[in-house]
Image: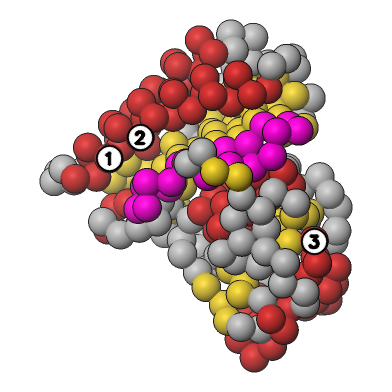
């Protein structure tokens, strides 16, 4: 398997979907919005963009199946599967604010081997392939070198359907507001993780996520020299409900802090 070629071929498909999404973002009048749940929305743009991705990625790797947020294709591959989110940050998209992103990851036996995150606001393509490092618009990227949560800028995502850990989450926000350089929430998990990979953020945590939110980002952070796990420290968070990403210097302290606060119930 030529991971680099697969990644670059897939990026051309992402660019096609991005052109469509950008045009519809500029022309959002009469946007058809459906509610999948409270504060959880889908538009015809999500669905059409996913169709573009599924069609193009099928040509890139015909034997691969799909795990796609909007269910355009439920065909599962025996070895390879694309995990895609056509618009990560749909609520931002609906309201005309950034960031929102396309996230595409490819798994081989549940290991992510290629990943692409395209963030529209700054026109940034983050991408990586197994053993190939992490890249942003043609330039190599690396996680930050900040040592310790005290000096870190932390990103998170607010729960919007799953409030199981809301009390613990509020405690975690209180902790990081007081004990770090600050806390940020953009509304796109894929973008948050990409920002960890390129060193803009030093750590990210969130619960209630899905594989399509994080697949590409997991590989991106690792290829950029960082760490990714679930709250308990399991290094296979793809199909878990929570995730931590950080640089390697801060990971142990960050993970221990998150586990202590978020899993205290």
User: What residue lies at 66% left-to-right and 67% top-to-bottom?
Assistant: 202
User: What residue lies at 72% left-to-right and 67% top-to-bottom?
Assistant: 145
* Image color mode: secondary structure
Nearer the observer: mark 3 or 1; the answer is 3
Marks 2 and 3, the one that precedes in the sequence: 2
Q: Are marks 1 and 2 in contact (CB under 8 Å)?
A: yes
User: What residue lies at 46% left-to-right and 64% top-to-bottom?
Assistant: 186
Q: Secondary structure at mark 1?
A: helix
Would residue 132 be counted in the magenta stretch? yes
Circle 3: is it few (<14), some (14-19), or many (20+) Cα within 10 Å? many
Circle 1: is it few (<14), some (14-19), or many (20+) Cα within 10 Å? some
Pointer 2: what residue? 18
Give the quarter of the image for residue 247: bottom right
Range of residues picked out in magenta: 118-136
Q: In the figure, 51 relative to 182: above or below?
A: above
x and y percentages locating residue 195 in the rendered image? 56, 58
Residue 248 tag number = 3
Pointer 1: what residue? 22
x and y percentages locating residue 211 in the rendered image? 64, 41
- Residue nearest the observer in this picture, 260 or 202: 202
Q: CA distance from mark 1 to mark 2?
A: 6 Å
Q: CA distance from mark 2 to mark 3?
A: 32 Å
Q: Are marks 2 and 3 in contact (CB under 8 Å)?
A: no
Q: Secondary structure at mark 3?
A: helix
């Amino acid at each position: 398997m030529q991971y680099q070629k697969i990644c670059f071929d897939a990026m051309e498909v992402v660019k096609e979907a991005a052109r469509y999404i950008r045009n519809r973002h500029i022309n959002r009048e009469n946007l058809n919005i459906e509610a999948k749940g409270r504060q959880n929305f889908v538009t015809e743009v999500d669905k059409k963009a996913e169709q573009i991705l599924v069609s193009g990625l099928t040509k890139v790797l015909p034997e691969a199946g799909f795990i796609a947020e909007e269910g355009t294709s439920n065909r599962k591959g025996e070895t390879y599967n694309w995990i895609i989110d056509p618009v990560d940050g749909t609520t931002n998209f609906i309201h005309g604010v950034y960031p929102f992103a396309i996230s595409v990851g490819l798994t081989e036996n549940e290991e992510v081997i290629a990943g692409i995150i395209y963030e529209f606001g700054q026109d940034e393509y983050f991408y990586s392939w197994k053993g190939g490092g992490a890249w942003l618009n043609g330039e190599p990227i690396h996680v930050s070198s900040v040592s310790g949560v005290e000096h870190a800028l932390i990103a998170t995502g607010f729960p919007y359907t799953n409030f199981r850990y809301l009390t613990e989450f509020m405690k975690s926000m209180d902790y990081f507001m007081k004990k770090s350089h600050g806390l940020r929430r953009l509304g796109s998990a894929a973008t948050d993780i990409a920002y960890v990979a390129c060193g803009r953020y030093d750590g990210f945590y969130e619960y209630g996520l899905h594989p399509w939110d994080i697949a590409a980002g997991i590989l991106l952070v690792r290829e950029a020299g960082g760490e990714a796990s679930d709250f308990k420290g399991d290094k296979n968070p793809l199909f878990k409900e929570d995730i931590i990403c950080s640089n390697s210097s801060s990971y142990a302290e960050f993970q221990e802090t998150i586990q202590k606060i978020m899993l205290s119930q």
